[in-house]
Image (spheres, grey):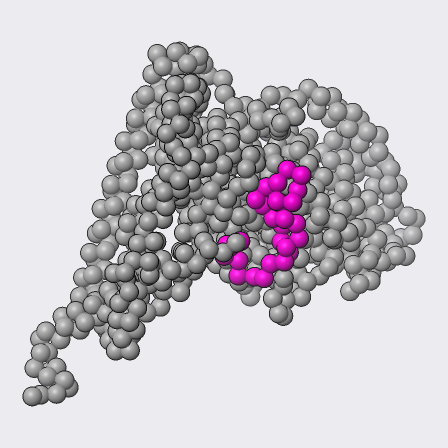
Amino acid sequence: MPSEQTAMPMLSPFGPLMEYIVDAAQRNMLFWDVMRQRGNQYREHLAKTVPHVLDYEPKLVIDGRTLPRPVNYGLVRIVPPAGVAIDPLRRPFVIIDPRAGHGPGIGGFKAESEIGVAFKAGHPCYFVGFLPDPMPGQTLGDIAQAEAVFLEKVIALHPDAEGKPCVIGNCQAGWAVMMLAAIRPELFGPIIIAGSPLSYWAGVRGKNPMRYSGGLLGGSWWTAFTSDLGHGNFDGAWLVQNFENHNPANTLWAKQYKLYSKIDTEAPRYLGFERWWGGHVNLNAEEIQSIVDELFIGNNLAAGKIQTSDGTAIDLRNICSPIVVFCSKGDNITPPQQALGWILDLFENVDEIRSYGQTIVYAIHETVGHLGIFVSGGVAKKEHEQFSSNIDLIDTLPPGLYEAVFEAKTQDTANPDLVTGDWVMRCEARTLDDIRALGGNDAADERRFATAARASEINLALYRTFAQPVVRALVSAPLAEWTARMHPLRFQYEFFSNVNPMMAPVAAMAKEVARHRRPAAADNPFIAWQENISRQIVAGLDAWRDASEALAERTFLTVYGLPALQAAVGIDPASTRPFRKAARNLLHHELLRNRVAELRSRIPLGALREAVIRGPLYAGMTRAAIDERGFEAVRRIRQIHGDLSLSAFKALVREQFNMLLIDQEAALASLPSMLPPDAETQRAAFGLIKQVLAARGEMSAQDRDRLNEVGRLFGVDEDGSASRIPFRQTRKEPRAQAS
């Protein structure tokens, strides 16, 4: 009998086929073993008291179940890994994960994460997570109060920090953070909201079909019905399934195929993600009903039409902290229009944003999907790392609207020592027209969504009156528990775990296969054939999705565009007014007039410190952009020579900037009177201004003209007599002394 080595040449015409058959059979067995591991992992994860997927050690600080109004949330301190140095004077970061069907921890899922980059920048880190089941009777208001207690605790633990905590809200947690910041603005430093829908109606036709879901289901009565089937609990698995339904190619094929095709290397990554994806959590009926009615279908947040339990209207214009909005064009769950549309609902122009003292910075990724916004390692190493390392720059920006632009640091980058990381962040001034250019609804679309919201209210009232009592009478707690266990998403994990006797031999067979693994060569023609078949399947499923979404969009636009239906629910079919535009605040305008008069009277006041801040603000105004290198130069100068805390420096920058906006001519004319008579000090001060403006590289002709104008006011000639002589104060700030 010929040996295997001598037999192969005899079969050489069929060699690639036999090689592929062996490889495919082995991959098939290893694939089902990973499915078995996934099922067992699912059961082990849910058996934990506090299941999470954090890659860091958490230490409990406050258990929300012990608060006067108990909630299933908790505050933990993240223990820095070995080798990570934390600066106790840096502001703490607080990461809040979304409770949108999945469990907590995705913000610290791996080293390259929101927590990881905050640690890299030297910030203390805290995390707000939650248990799988809500406390009986807890409301969104209770959760907001608990999170306020958490922030108060973090602030108390860091009394010497240079600023209030930076709070990151991912997805659903983003709008929750914004609501709390509007009620308790004094608790917040900069706010970063990632992939958060604040203007749910917004979008463009043909791209954002999820916003039609509420109307196509007839409104939120389905939410109430689902909660009744859960005996007062809403199963988060339904939210996860809703995500999956919007990408059938990935759900039904691509995710599993990637594991199958790369079975020798892909299993750890796949199992790690599935541990979070399968960790379903619940909401109670009141929580989910409020979310759907007020936010998703009602779209009431930006319009200021949501009230707290004591009747206080939630107005996002009350937020005092800088707001960073991170979104992506590749996100079909929260497209840029939904992430940024609230700005158009609240403000008429950038001047109005400034009048409220708000700073809004947005960044739009070109391709990453919804989960990648807060999961992708590449995003963490670029956008989130830049936000973390430049959070003080963001906190000090003058009020206005900016877009964060990132450029790779290269050998040609000017002053690379002033750049942290591999990217240079620049905040470029924008107007509301830049937001409008992303696309959005016209008046007819707004009427359609307003009609869907009214129809939802009617259908919900009908359900509660005629059907809800019957459903609640028929659904018992055991039946609700059985229904949850049999949910398709849960059942697939259970079925392929060791609970199923049919999976018992899989582990041993897979172990044997691994010992004799013979993967096919990369150039095997049948591997190429397999890849081609996979691409065709994905293309077919994508075509099915596109056709389904197009049909859903046409149905929504047709049904809710009917003038008869609009009139029947109280919407004027001829109306062109915006339905969710925030009302003007007359008190604010009166306070603004008083504030302008006060600032105008103080323009001539001040000394050298005010002049050194007013000068570069004026000289750099035409740039319409603020570079991190300029701020880093300011920070270093402030550390060595200054006596201002970061918060005081921020207030001074904003005050001087506002004075230039109110009366630029008077602000410039006052500069000489603010300077000391000592010419040497004047030259040294102007040297600092020049040093800051030159930090980003070569200055434009316009920059030089304005800088020379400031120089003349400082008594410095155009011939370069301004020096880099250090301008020293008598006192160093605590941070410099600690260093």
Q: Give left or right: position of 617 versus 366.
A: right
Q: Along the line of sight, which residue is nearer the eye, 479 or 687?
A: 479
- Tell me if residue 598 comes above or below residue 12 in the rendering: above
Q: Quadrant of the image for the C terminus? A: bottom right
Is residue 361 at least partly visible in the picture? no
Q: Is residue 62 magenta?
A: yes
Residue 267's place in the image compared with 189, above or below, is: below
Q: Position of residue 494 (x, y in %)?
A: 34, 53
- Residue at 46 percent across and 55 percent down: it is 47
Extreme residue toward the right, this view: 677
As drawn, 463 above or below 238: above
Magenta residues?
A: 50-77
**Which residue sits at x=30%, y=26%?**
555
Residue 348: give x, y in percent of width and height: 58, 26
Determine the residue positioned at 83% across, 47% down.
Answer: 609
Which one is in front, 116 or 436?
116
Q: Quadrant of residue 117?
A: bottom right
Left or right position of 603 against 146: right
Residue appearing at x 86%, y 41% in the figure: 606
- Tell me where residue 401 sits by quadrant: top right
* Residue 187, magenta (yes or no): no
Residue 167 position, x and y percent, is: 62, 47
Residue 356: percent from left, percent from top: 68, 31
